[in-house]
Every structure is written in C-alpha cells, then in structure tokens.
Amino acid sequence: MEARSTTCTAVALGLFFFGHGVLGGIEWPDPTARLIENFGSPGSYGPTLGHSFQSNGVLRAAKAGEVIFQRKAEDGASLLPSPLGSWIAVDHGEGIIGTYARYEAMDNPVPRRSVEKGTVLGSAGSSGWSADQGFYFSLFDRRERRWVNPSMLIPPPADTRSPTIRAVVLAGRDGGMINPSQVRSLRQGTYRILVDAFDTIDATGKTLAPYRILGFVNGIEQGALHLETIAGRDGRLFVHRTQPTPAKQVYAGPYFEVGETRLSRGRANMEIIARDMVGNERIVSYQLNVE
Amino acid sequence: MAETKRKNWILLGIPFFVLYLFIASVPIPKETVLENRWLVSVAEAGTDGEAEPDVLPVRLGDRLAYVDSQGRFSVNKRVQGYAALSDTLWSEYGPTPEILTIQDRRGEAVAVVSGVKGYPALIEGRVFIVAPEQQALTALDSSGSPLWSYEFSSPLIALDATADLVVAACIDGSMVVLNMEGKANFTFEPGGSRLPIILAARITKDGKRIALISGIDAQRFLLLERFGISYKVVHHEFLGEGFRRPIHLAFVNEERKVLFEREGGIGIYDIQSGKSALIPMDGRLVALDGGGKDGNLHVIGASGDKKFLMGIGGTPAVAITAPFVATSSFIRRSGELLYIGGDGVLAAFALREK
C-alpha cells in the first residue's frame, strides 16, 4: 500500500539523504530538552512550522554556519513586534536556515560572522511567545522556499509509543459528519476523510503531531498527509498531502483532512494509518456497507 | 617726511579695509542651542486629566506614556510584559495573550481582539497581528475583527504600513506590498548580495516610495518609487559587508530624506538632490527623530554604556553632540520642542538658534 505514495517517499528520501549528506552531523540545539510541540502540530494559523522545547540548559548551534540575523526581544529598531522573542538565524549551508528563538539572549551577542557546531547561542528562556522555559527551533529551506520538519534531518529521540487515532470522520458534501466506528452503513457518495490523531513520545508524554497519516479504501490509497515540508506561496501555507494542499483545508478544526474518497455501493474496507518519526504506527480499520 | 609717508599709507589702507569688511566678511554662524522647558520623573509624574489632546507617545525603559507639550501625561504606566505603541494607539500584553485590548492615547479601550493569536503591530492608526511564528499577518478593523490574513514564504523581519498599504520583508530576501484586501500588489527580491535578506523596510505615508536595507556582503540601501501599480528602484548604494540585525531606517524631514544606520555612522539620502551623505558616528544608533521642516535631525547613539545625543543640520553635518549616561533612551521632536528621555527622566527642550 505504501508503495503507492511514491512521490512523497521520493521527497522523504531526498530530504533524508540531503539531511544526512550535506547537512550530515546536524544535532539538536539541546539534546536534553523535552519536545513539547512539533512540526505540523495544529496551531492558531494552521500548522506549527518548527519544534518547541522545554529546557533549562543552553542552546547551541545545531551545525556550523553563518549568522545572518539576530534580534533581541526588546530591540526597537523595527516596527515589527517579536513573537519569536530573542532569535537568531543561522545559514547552515545548502540554503538551510536554522531559526533559534524564544531564548534568553546573551549580553554579548554571538560572534558576528560564523558559528561552529555547538557554539552557545544563548540560554533557554521565555522571551516572545512562550509559556515555558525553553526555546523554539525551525529549519527553513531557502532554495525550495519551505519549512522542513527538523526531525527529518536530525535523528528523533528513541520512542516506543505508537500514535493515537482518537477519531475518524467521513464528511459528506452535504455537510453531514459520519463516524465510521458508530455507523455500519452509509450512502454512496464522496466523502472527505478527517482524522483526529496525535503522537506522544516516551520522553514527555506531550501531545504531538504524527509524521504521516494515510487513508486507504479497499487497499487503494485515498489520501496521504506527509508532515515533512510546509511552504508559503501567494499568501497561503501549503502542506504536502498527495500534492500541495492549502493548510487551512488540511487543518480542519481538531481533524487533519487526509484526503477524499468516492464510496460506491457494496462493502468497503477503510484503513487509517498514523505513523510517527521513528516508524511506530497505529492502524484502525472499518467495515462499511455502502448503499 | 617719513611721518607723512606713514599717514599716506594709513589713509590709503582705510578704504581697502572698509572694502574688505564688505566683501570678505562672513556672518558669525548661528548655533543651535537647547533651552530646557521642563523635566519630569516619568514614574513619579502620574497622569493628568488636563493634558492636551495632542500628546506624543513615549516608550522609556519599562514605562509607556503619552505626554503633552507641558509635560503632563494622559497615559503613564509601567509595562509588565510587552507593549505596542503608536501615535494614536497602544496595547499592553503578556507573553501568550488570548485577548488583546487596544487603547487610545486617553487610555480608553477602542478594540478588543480575541481569536487571533499573536502580537499587535500598531502602525498609522491600523492594527495588525503578527502570528506566533512570525510567518503570518492579520489586519483588523477598528473593532478588532479580522479583515484578512497573509502567510509569508519565510519568517518576517520588517514591517511598515500606510493607510492602505502594507510592506513586509522576510528572511529569505523577499518583500511584498499588500493592498487593503491583503492581496499582493507587488513583490520584489533585491538580490545583489552573497546572502539575500531584507533587514529593514519603510514606506512613505503616500505609498509612493519604499526604502530597503537588503543583503549581507554586500549590504545595500535601495529606494523604490511607484510607477503605476509597480515600483522601480530609483537609487541604490552599497554599504559594505553590513549588519546582521534590525536596522534603523526612516523617511525623515517630511519624507524628503531617508536616514539609515550604516557601517561607520549614519547614512542620509536626499531624495530631491539624489545626494547621499555619511555622518560619522562611533557607536550604534538606538533612537532617531523624524526631524522637522527645517531639515534638522536628532538621533541618539550608544557606545558601550554611554549614550550621546547628536543633532544633524540640514547640510548635513553634525551641529550638536551631548553625551549622557542611561540604560534606556527616547527622542522625539514636535514643532520646536525636542523631547529627550534617559532612564526614568523625560525632558523637553526648545530648539533655538543663537
């Protein structure tokens, strides 16, 4: 079944080799920090574009690079407020810009030009949009104009927990919402597949976004959401589903819209698979009578 | 005989001396002096219901205030978290606000924002919300309801607005001009540098000109002018390798000039003459005033713990410098009054030429 997601697998493999090749040796800014919100988590504007960590340690450059921008939270030169608090952007090469944010800036700023891997950028803090002591980290691919899931380039922490699929809903074009676990039969027609799923990891137990959600009907892929990259174009964010899809469409309330399926008369076997970065997965199946 | 000769020489010299006085004399140049009008401790001043309607916004250390020409405050408070402040509106908020209250310069609530997460940017009487990851901007109406949202291609670095336009610049070196509906009227990538980035962007009140500081190695100052619905670069200059932080950039002297921080001092570009000047400054620019009709400008620079006021004449050349010690500082001019703040003290000076 998975072989059908060839495009996305190619993207993932490309980024994997890219990450372990050109950006080989990239590490987490603070390996002891606890991941509390991850790339793709539902946020106020749709998907979250980076990882947020809880930490009391120091924040280090994930890889060598060149500092291209740094701002202290209270800097008054710009009319722009700074929800990123005190932040620094480092060009790590090959167009990848690392954003380290919401930390406690040092009195003496980072050396002007370059940083080595492990250079201390600041201490974990709570500047900008942060409720906890920690920091925010994101990776932006300048060449492709998209944010990249950091967990694709940096090995995620060990984790044995599978994602949880809390609910699956089929949304009809008439606006009707059908829960396949409670309904044995439904009318033929076209339905959007909505999945309420989340992941947890051993280290924190916090609710995180899964890495992939796939939807199959009778063994045929009907939709696949890959939280690998998110791009901003023409004033909108796009998430990579089977093809770039507006984030506002994918992030439908508490659900992820995974795809759309046309159900014809007869029996239908629907499978929803949620997978995390490590490869742990959860599968739920529904037997449906389509009338 | 010798006595007569000497008298003749003197008599001959007198007309030349008189002639010299008329031809070669130069008037003694006038000096700008600051006459102190008042000085107040902001924290101790409180508010005064008799404050004039025409008050100026003041952000000084942890204080947020609106002050009139007599040193009376219509709003005067200690900021607990963060604050946004403009000529007409202000808002105080915590790190992750669920609700934002926008207030006027009398302290009256004019809008309550809920359901749009982020930090407020108050520019030209308009209210915007910058999303938590600085990748989106939402414009609000006067009641605080969302009008439109725009999601950018990378994190925002600079923002400015007029009554009907928004200019926003991002870390990937792109700039976009948005119209009243939040649609992109114009997009631009200056390029020309090893590292593309836009560090500062400002737009004139009439929307006709945009100033940018772009790129690293080399950094450039660019001035764009509107032609139809588009903008074209009408001036650019290289500024050396450049800064890697937010940079002060402003249209000054009734938008006839552009002032910006550059390596080695302050750059001033005269739009009419097309001439550019560098005012040497040893330190970092921390505050500037938009100047008046007379062409004079005032800035505050910082070098280490010490700050200094610098007055720049229309030539342009440094007309006045005055060092002082303060952690926070403020400067603003209104008419003939120059307001200068240092830590908890705010003072007004009349600008006089003597």
Image: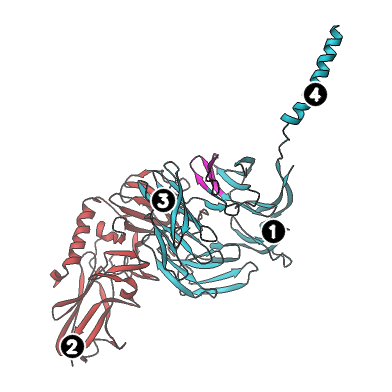
- Report whether B260 appears left or right of B71: left
Q: Chain of mark 1?
A: B
Specify the amino acid type for callout 1.
Answer: Glu
Specify the amino acid type for callout 2.
Answer: Leu
What residue sits right under mark 3 in the picture? Answer: A69
Q: Is residue B271 above or below residue B28?
A: below
The magenta span reads B260-286
The chain displayed red equals A
Marks 3, 2 in one chain: yes
What residue sits right under mark 2 in the picture? Answer: A288
Q: Chain of mark 3?
A: A
Disc on res. B15: 4
Specify the amino acid type for callout 3.
Answer: Phe
Q: CA distance from mark 4 to mark 3?
A: 68 Å
Dot 4: within a 10 Å radius of its alpha carbon, few (fewer than 14), some, or many (20 or more) residues? few
Specify the amino acid type for callout 4.
Answer: Pro
What residue sits right under mark 1 in the picture? Answer: B44
The chain displayed cyan equals B
Dot 2: within a 10 Å radius of its alpha carbon, few (fewer than 14), some, or many (20 or more) residues? some
Q: CA distance from mark 4 to mark 2?
A: 118 Å
- Which residue corresponds to the image point at 83% horizontal and 14% vertical from the top-left? B8
Residue A1 at x, y percent in the picture: 13, 73
**Quarter-wise, where is residue A124 in the image?**
bottom left
Front-most of A170 and A33? A170
Marks 4, 2 in one chain: no
Front-most of B325 and B85? B85
